[in-house]
Image (tube, helix red, strand yellow):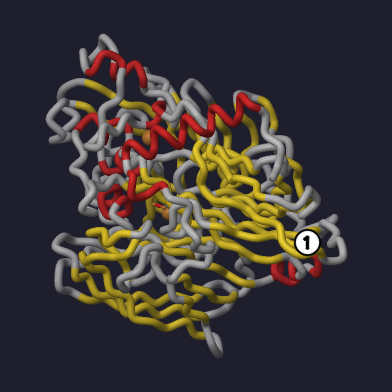
Amino acid sequence: MPKINRREFLILSAASAVTASIANWAIAQSNKTLAASSKLYKSTNGLLELNLEASDRPVPIAGIQAYLMSYNGQVPAPRLEAKAGDTVRIHFTNNLSQPTNLHYHGLHVPPTGNGDNPFLSIEPGESLTYEFTIPKNHPSGIFWYHPHHHHYVAEQLFAGLAGLFIVRGELDEIPEIQAAREEFLVLKDFDLDKSGHILPQNHMAMMLGREGQLLTVNGQVNPKFTIAKGGLLRLRILNASPSRFYRLSLENHPFYLIATDGVAIAAPVRLEELLLAPGERAELLVRGEKELGQYRLLTLPYDRGGMGMMGGGMGMMGGHRMGGGMGMMGNSSQTSPQVLATLTYHSAVATLPLPERLIPVETLPEPETVRRFELSMAMGSGMGMGAGMGMGFTFNGQTFDPERVDTQVKLNTVEDWELINVDPDRMDHPFHLHINRFQVISRNGQPEPYRAWKDTVLVRGGETVRIRIPFRDFAGKTVYHCHILDHEDLGMMGIVSIQA
Ligand code: C2O
Ligand code: CU
Ligand code: CU
């Protein structure tokens, strides 16, 4: 067993006790491994083709049958794998009782037609075939798919609609990475009653961004994963929760970051912990360099702001968060570490080295245009929110309007966007842009320590983050939004039109 000190032990025990009282059925250490029951679809001869059906039905999760929304009856959804240059053809059917569509988060593909088009609406009972080609020079990495129908995104994602979309390529071919054992981790929280029904979410839960107390990895509670003594583990992690942040730490083990939002960085970066906001992905290497034993993958407490909303201003709950049901207390309620999964050592192998170099990250040219975006929750009349409280989540003071183009850019130019979080409640807002990746240049004027590609970046309360975006290859309209998906559904989304 790894050594943990008494204080850590008490903290962890307390965390377990709290969780157990909330959901007894969910806390037992599962004997399940990380390998999800989800099906894998791989491209062959340059084509990834499959049928995908969204439906409401009972799905096994965390040892019970839960009434969720799923793709092909699986939570997480089937994992899709393709290569640069492949064609993707998905015959999609909506058997939900509400409209939906599909978004391919992080892929650099056309935003128009039946490509990665968030403006499509597929009504209940309707079908649509999505088809697009992944460019030949597309980087390898972790991407994902989920619904993107405005006003329904948070609800549908929370109910279970999300899956990995892996692009295989150059990162997978580095010998040290090939030698590592690959594990996928889809992090997703649920808010269920004892009979497995999703609890209704009240308005406050939506303002904060809905969270559930049941934490799963690939639909399992505390699954096991293994590492060989001397071996290397490659963890490919997606935060598929609509609002929950994960501050990951593995007992006694540092992480070696090799990719951000699915795309490789130039060389591994050693980290003691990693914060993943909703929508973000990361790839980590772990070395099997400790004593044989069990080590817990934890999510540590993180405060994503918004407490002011609960205080005098709105006179609600006296500072305690209230969510849908189950006494959900929202994001700041996690005051102690919680266990996500357990790593176990097994037999020794010859010690594997870490890679020294990964994939170079290009230096972008200076921007032609610099824009400012103020991110904020805005209160007052005229927001047109219909949310009952006159509250909206905004970019530059405006909530989403599907008829309005907010930002016009020219194809084949590079822009800097300054993202300024002026939220009065100092809530964190993770900013996400579709279709085109970007690099973070600075935070509050401080340059980033290493260059990396991102498509989702956390902008903390009070913070200014400058990103540099090359608009390449595809003209058309697409969106940027807060990836706390309730905020997106409450208006924190804008349209960018890329003109040839
Ligand atoms: Cu994962 Cu528009 O989002
Ligand atoms: Cu996206
Ligand atoms: Cu937000």
Q: Position of residue 298 (x, y in %)?
A: 56, 41
The residue sitting at 15% across, 23% down in the picture is: 381
Give neighbour class at mark 1: few <14, some 14-19, many 20+ (Cα, 10 Å).
Answer: many
Q: Position of residue 492 (x, y in %)?
A: 33, 38
Q: Quadrant of residue 325 in the image?
A: top left
**Residue 79 percent location from the top left of the image:** 47, 70
Residue 69 position within the rendered picture, expressed as x and y whole percent measured from the top left: 26, 61
227 and 235: which is toward the camera? 227
Whether residue 70 is visible: yes
Side (left or right) of 159 relative to 253: left
Question: In terms of secondary structure, where does tag 1 sit?
Answer: loop
Task: Please tell me whether residue 322 is drawn above or below residue 175 in the rendered image.
Answer: above
Three-letter amino acid code at the position of disc 1:
Gly
Q: Please state, as top left, top right, bottom left or bottom right, where the N terminus lies in the image.
A: top right
Q: Is residue 214 left or right of residue 165?
A: left
In this picture, is 403 found above or below 106? above
Q: Nearer the viewer, residue 312 or 299?
A: 299
Q: Which residue is mark 1?
A: 231
Can residue 369 be seen from the camera position used here? Answer: no
* Left or right of 235, for residue 378: left
Q: Is residue 436 left or right of residue 288?
A: left
Q: How many marks?
A: 1
Position of residue 304 relative to residue 76, above or below, is above
